Amino acid sequence: MKFRDWLKAGIKVKRWILFGILGVLLIAFGFTELVTRRVYDIYYKIFYVFLNITGIFVIYISVTEAMKSIIVMINKGYLKISFDSKKIESLIYEKRLLVKGPKIVVIGGGTGLSTMLRGLKYYTSNITAVVTVGDDGGGSGDLREDLGILPPGDIRNCILALADTEPLMQDLLQYRFQDGRLKNQSFGNLFLAAMAGISDNFEDAVQKMSSVLAVTGMVLPVTLDDMQLVAMLENGNKVYGESQIPEEVIKQNSIISNLSIEPEDAQPLKEALQAIKEADAIVMGPGSLYTSVISNLLVKRISLAVRKSDALKIYVCNVMTQPGETDNFTTTDHLKILKKYGGKDIVDCVISNSGDISDELKDKYLKNNCILVTSDEKEIKDLGVDLVQENIVKVENEIVKHDSERLAEVLIDTIMKKKLLYDKKKIIEYMYLSQRIKGREKKEKK
């Protein structure tokens, strides 16, 4: 490539750009004269209108000719643009599949819900997370008390789980201050609290934060009312507050007899009810049975909407029992409590873990009165619920939790088989998508 040829081509593009600027000036002058000055002579009006039309024509010519010149430069090798067309095509195809994915509503709270969402967002972009707002402990409780806003912690975790952000931004929003008045407070909580300060209401703040972080799907608080959990223990004592309930159950050695909310007539978000109505699948859990899952179902009309929905209703059972809430519970016990508060038809299918953990880890958890949740297929079938049992356990830093990738895969597979089996084309597309995601994750891990 000769420098003189490259220079000529560059000058030609530059001329067309300057020609386009002339068009912009013609439009600006003509429009300004028409709007800011009172021109009574019809000939002057025609002249200024003509200037605007001429400006538009000039811009059109300059843009098209400049593009032609750039294409010529690329073809002749004067400009080099490199991109992986196959990769771009693959990403576009995956995005199209995600948009056509099943409509899934997830109901719950806590770290279990956000863990599941991290895996689920790779299979569908039609996700609505309905999140509890009963939290009154930790940093969320402090902000709730000081600023009078709904607790942001669980909502923040769900937003981050569905967000398409850089790792640095994730770390920043999860960062907790170590000293001073902000000690143990999450920056993400403060970010959401600040957003609430410049928004009409808390729901609006959540949507704005979701927009900033490019969230896949939608995150909704179950209610905008200042909701508080109230537990009646078997010994007759009442306990107020989500953070206090498990502690008092252990302290008083008395299990939860009944759970309620105040105010009893807390109103659900219309968007949450609409999402439940239109869903292909409704997923409850994983998370604390009473304080994360049941707390949502106690909000007026939420459990009724779930029961009336044509969606496949799935409960994701916890891997381990939780002290103060589900001591010595089996999967059957979880389902009985779910039906007690949500109604007989609140669940169609339960996903439980069949995987195991090391004996050393079992002993460690046993010291805190935690054991693996077991499942009895006959007992579950007698409750009118289908059992899907898979190895969905993951151990990270000696902490037992759900494997987000495997759980999402099992959920999608269950939804496709039990709800969308009639759509063979969609099943094939999702099988393809699943394989691509697995392949990409393996490469990223390497």
Image: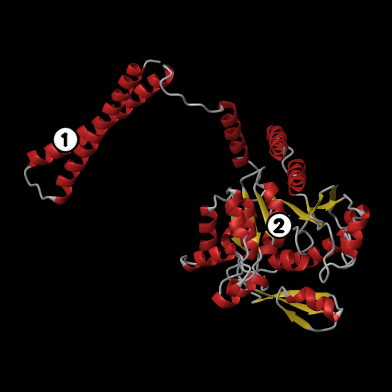
The residue at the point 90 percent across, 66 percent down is 328
Residue 15 or residue 30, whichever sits in front = 15
Q: Residue 113 carries which label?
A: 2
**SS for callout 1:** helix
The residue carrying pointer 2 sits among few (fewer than 14), some (14 to 19) or many (20 or more) residues within 10 Å by Cα, namely many
Q: The residue under label 2 is which amino acid type?
A: Leu
Q: Can you say whether 305 is above or below 253 in the image?
A: above
Q: Which of marks 2 and 1 is nearer the N terminus?
A: 1
The residue carrying pointer 1 sits among few (fewer than 14), some (14 to 19) or many (20 or more) residues within 10 Å by Cα, namely some
Q: Quadrant of the C terminus?
A: top right
- Asked if residue 275 shows in the view, the reply is no
| Residue 199 shown left or right of residue 108 in the figure | left
Which residue is labeled 1 in the image?
A: 50
**SS for callout 2:** helix
Q: Position of residue 6 (x, y in %)?
A: 35, 20
Q: Quadrant of residue 260?
A: bottom right
Q: Can you say whether 361 is above or below 139 in the image?
A: above
The residue at the point 89 percent across, 67 percent down is 367
Residue 333 or residue 11, whichever sits in front = 11
Q: The residue under label 1 is which amino acid type?
A: Phe
The residue at the point 84 percent across, 60 percent down is 320
Q: Quadrant of the N terminus?
A: top left
Q: Position of residue 2 (x, y in %)?
A: 37, 15
- Circle 2 or circle 1, nearest the eye: 2
The residue at the point 12 percent across, 37 percent down is 47
For the residues labelled 2 and 1, the Cα–Cα distance comes to 62 Å
Coloring applied to the structure: secondary structure
